[in-house]
Image (spheres, coloured by chain):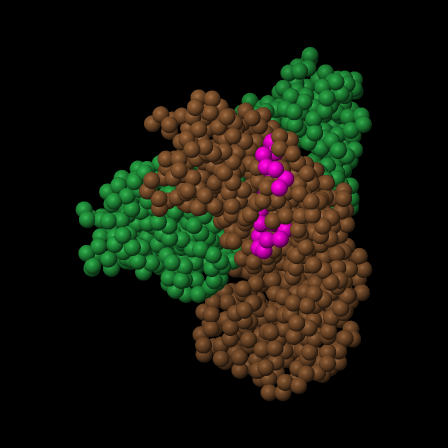
Chain colours: A brown, B green
Amino acid sequence: MRTLLIPPGRISSVAAEVCAAMSDPEATSRVREPRPDQNTAQVLRDMANRLRIQSIRAMCSLDSGHSMSCNSAAEIMSVLLFHTMRYKQADPEHPDNDRFVLPKKLSLTDAVTGWCGQGLGAACGMAYTGKYFDKASFRVYCLVSDDISDGSVWEAMAFASHHALDNLVAIFDLNCVTHGGSSPAAYCTDIYQKRCEAFGCSTYVVDGRNVEALCHVFWQAAQVKNRPTAVIAKTLRGRGMPNIEDTDNWYGKPMSKERAEAIIELIESQIQTNRNLTPSLPIEDSPEISIGDVKMTTPPAYQIGGKLATQKACGLALAKLGHVNERLIVLDGDNRNTFSEVFKNEHPERFIECFIAEQNMVSVALGCAYRGRTIAFASTFAAFLTRAFDQIRAGALAEMNVNLIGSHCGVSVGEDGPLLMALEDLALFRAIPNCTIFYPSDAVSTERAVYLAASNKGMCFIRTSQPETAVIYTPQEKFEIGQAKVVRKSVNDKVTVIGAGVTLHEALEAADNLSKEDIFIRVIDLFTIKPLDVATIIFNAKATGGQIITVEDHYPEGGIGEAVCAAVSTERDIVVHQLAVSGVPQGGKPQELLDMFGISAKHITVAVKCIVMD
Amino acid sequence: MRTLLIPPGRISSVAAEVCAAMSDPEATSRVREPRPDQNTAQVLRDMANRLRIQSIRAMCSLDSGHSMSCNSAAEIMSVLLFHTMRYKQADPEHPDNDRFVLPKKLSLTDAVTGWCGQGLGAACGMAYTGKYFDKASFRVYCLVSDDISDGSVWEAMAFASHHALDNLVAIFDLNCVTHGGSSPAAYCTDIYQKRCEAFGCSTYVVDGRNVEALCHVFWQAAQVKNRPTAVIAKTLRGRGMPNIEDTDNWYGKPMSKERAEAIIELIESQIQTNRNLTPSLPIEDSPEISIGDVKMTTPPAYQIGGKLATQKACGLALAKLGHVNERLIVLDGDNRNTFSEVFKNEHPERFIECFIAEQNMVSVALGCAYRGRTIAFASTFAAFLTRAFDQIRAGALAEMNVNLIGSHCGVSVGEDGPLLMALEDLALFRAIPNCTIFYPSDAVSTERAVYLAASNKGMCFIRTSQPETAVIYTPQEKFEIGQAKVVRKSVNDKVTVIGAGVTLHEALEAADNLSKEDIFIRVIDLFTIKPLDVATIIFNAKATGGQIITVEDHYPEGGIGEAVCAAVSTERDIVVHQLAVSGVPQGGKPQELLDMFGISAKHITVAVKCIVMD
């Protein structure tokens, strides 16, 4: 959970810093044998101590830090960075570089903390991409440490072994560091060995302080075929720090400058060489790819008046887009009814089955999209994405390019009951920084949303619905992020009604009914909930007497209504009336539920009349 | 994830329905031997078939359903309900009844679907409560099925074995039913056996269709000491249904009435007896308890002007309340700095260590609080509660009584960086139906919040902060849910500033500074964010020219600002200016970050001046 994703480039800059601090910067070629010679081993030990010193220094300058656990992994880091991993120090973004995912707070350099990731799940996504999409030689290493108790580790392990990710090495740093004392089964390498074996890994137990043993075990891992490797490394927290090594009460706490200096002096006294090691170069066998090519080749093939569920239109759009760009991939969490099936049938080699493990699915998607190797769409019931909130949040903080699709939103899902109804997903995604939220209302706008999401940077969320709704746009209609559509308009409009998805169709029905009584309303389709088209909302609200009604298949909190309230909050003459789903819903027929929870055409009609007669 | 928590009472009503449908309702006493006699075995088989018929009927009447997986578990259900479990059919809420947690969609009766729960984690909470708090004989059974790939299952397993929950039996229904086809390792009982053993369970593999074998294995489980039991039951989906048993494409889909009737007729033809079995009575050894006794015995021991972090005051309040009520318990996820340590030191026997596995922690808390056996407070960094959004959501839908504490909120947490800063937790909890959200601003109100949460029904969330803030209330100040405090007021006030937590103190500082320039502002401390004190907000806004400034250590989306905007959205003459944290934050000194992200006294001062000079 507290995970940092470090691209090898960043790591190499860490390594470079360490090297720069030495008086003899001359590099020695890295030995690729299973075991390093004595000289190399000593250099690796010295590099580990240099990493240790860097870590203590960084911690002291930050007044906070986790040097205890960083120190425990120093030998592992040293061996990976200077012996095992292949990467170009000068080209950190090179697609053939080995990947390293570090799920502990590494205080080596400030730059690193800008990168946050998803640990083993993200590593699985990178390894899957390497093995099945790129068919390349790069390998993926992931350190598992503080997050060892986290269930998502085992979701990832099950995924890795099911998909035979033999290019993945998970290193369990059993250093017994956690905020509250001993982990369950801390130091019990035996238990973790059994668990990793039971989850289908080729598993090795190793002394995590022994650089020769580490070199050997990573060499062994590279020989394993058709399953991932787990390395159970027994280490010591705070290693190398007198009176701190292997004790409690130091986790995440700074130490005095004097104490730090004394410890650094002691560690320095153990450094015997002044040599450097450079990493081996990667094998350059990744294909050249383009993820920019997502132009729509033919307009949506829907005609006004036709009927289709937006979640079905979404599946069809993905399948169509899959023919345009061969790096488009779709992940799903063991669902038949989300229509990612359509994509799976047409592009089976680019569909990733993630089973009922949504946290891992989102992490895998982040890993697949990492470094621009794929355009990833992860799809499941919108309600199930609540399970992955933390992964979504961390992915957004790391500015990852990933697209999430949440189907079966709102009470309109009908019979399956409240657990399956997403009524808080807009609140979730609106609170994700820089996330673009699409909420299309018909098949044409859904297809446009999929194309826009595919080419848009950063995280995108597409909210889709189960009921069949009418096509209201022509195939030629243009859509842009942040541009709402005014879909019903007259000079006599008294109220602006704002809807999206099923509620837009309720608003249109209300408009039809009201027009028979010579009451006219303006209707706005938001298309994107974030960014919100504030200008269109304010302009039309002012043109309709400052009256807005929002209607949404979502709880009132954090949804469309509040977004609109906030958007007009500094306008004295605009008022907003919110129609939304209050309280705990229940199962039933979709149309009955829209009525029961006050978001149907009938309720919009009454709300409009109340305003008009006021 | 798609979990139903069924209290035995509800189950017994299901059982009663089954029995009522029979022509000979005379009950036969249940045999408690390891293996049932031939007669009893046949009755159990017949009961399984009756459950199967009920399930098909319910599915047909609902137009949706999951009878396939229900059918696979019919023998397991029959043996548990009519042979193994001890409970009073007439007293479903009896504290000594065995518990049954069913994480699959059981379509047997409508009543059941009102109960939603958290699967194995909740079962762990019940078992922990039974073993350590009640020291009682009741046992807990949990069926794991569709959610078998979910990592939270393994968090729960690790918890159960770490805490030696020998009163817990997890039944893995390996029926191969999932929405998208085969689970990974479906049918591979061997793999699940290894996994359960590696996670510390006494593990048995059994033919899940064989009632004698099931009776025996549950009897064996009752002999196990100091570790939980896992029963790996190999079953068939859609069992008993010709052309459906063990095939794809039927999951969650209704079948035609004709087909259903034909299948029911076939199953009925296999029923050989017309007898009934009644469950054994429970051993009544739970203590009599009261969770209502949470009156504050002495007022908060803080003096105005003193300084204390609200997260520390929260820990102290829990420890104090622990002396008043002996059923108060605290759970934490492996954190030292959340101050639940204080409680742990004073009441070690009522502290539950949940390690870094927040999903499971929340589920365990729900299980502990179930049936009013404890007053449970689960505490961790507010940011980590995003990991448990789905558990929180499902717990609220099931109307569970549980209290969650989120510490280290907002950018004011400082150096540790954005991953540890909760800036979306208010959006999360506001979107939870009927959740009460406390956001206290000083030590006195924090202690009051803890007491109010302890005695309040439903889910409560308390948001606490790391910076030391001044005590602003006297120990005698009374607090109520939904009542804000006007903490600064004069007849000349031009603006109402609304804050909470650290931002309230920034608002007070701004008020002090502005008063030197003869600009006066009203300051409101919300105390609870949900329910919101709308009347106080509107009254004071109107008294200050309709001008409101909200200032919060949270993203603008879904937080205090939007809550206030929505509350005043139908008031033409009130405008709201939002100050909140925009974009992705970074680490730094707390006060610098408040400044950098525009929520410090300085920014409030400027915002007020802009309004006043407008």
> Between B306 and A382, which is closer to the camera in this rendering?
A382
Task: Give the residue at the far top of this rendering.
Answer: B23
Which quadrant of the view contains residue B564?
A: top left
Which quadrant of the view contains residue B174?
A: top right
Vertical placement of A82 versus B603: above or below? Answer: below
* Image location (x, y in percent) of residue B157: 64, 47
Vertical placement of A583 versus B270: above or below? Answer: below
* Image location (x, y in percent) of residue B272: 77, 18
* Image location (x, y in percent) of residue B323: 39, 46
Side of B217 where A271 appears, left or right:
left
Q: Is residue A602 magenta?
A: no
Position of the C terminus of chain A by quadrant: top left
Does the rendering let one see residue A271? Answer: yes
Position of the N terminus of chain A by quadrant: bottom right
Residue drawn 77% across and 26% down? B241
Residue drawn 64% across and 21% down? B61
> Between B165 and A156, which is closer to the camera in this rendering?
A156
* Image location (x, y in percent) of residue A438: 56, 44
Residue drawn 51% across and 65% down? A251
Which quadrant of the view contains residue B479?
A: top left
Side of B405 where A476 appears, left or right:
right
Q: Is residue A469 magenta?
A: yes
Q: Which residues are magenta?
A: A453-476
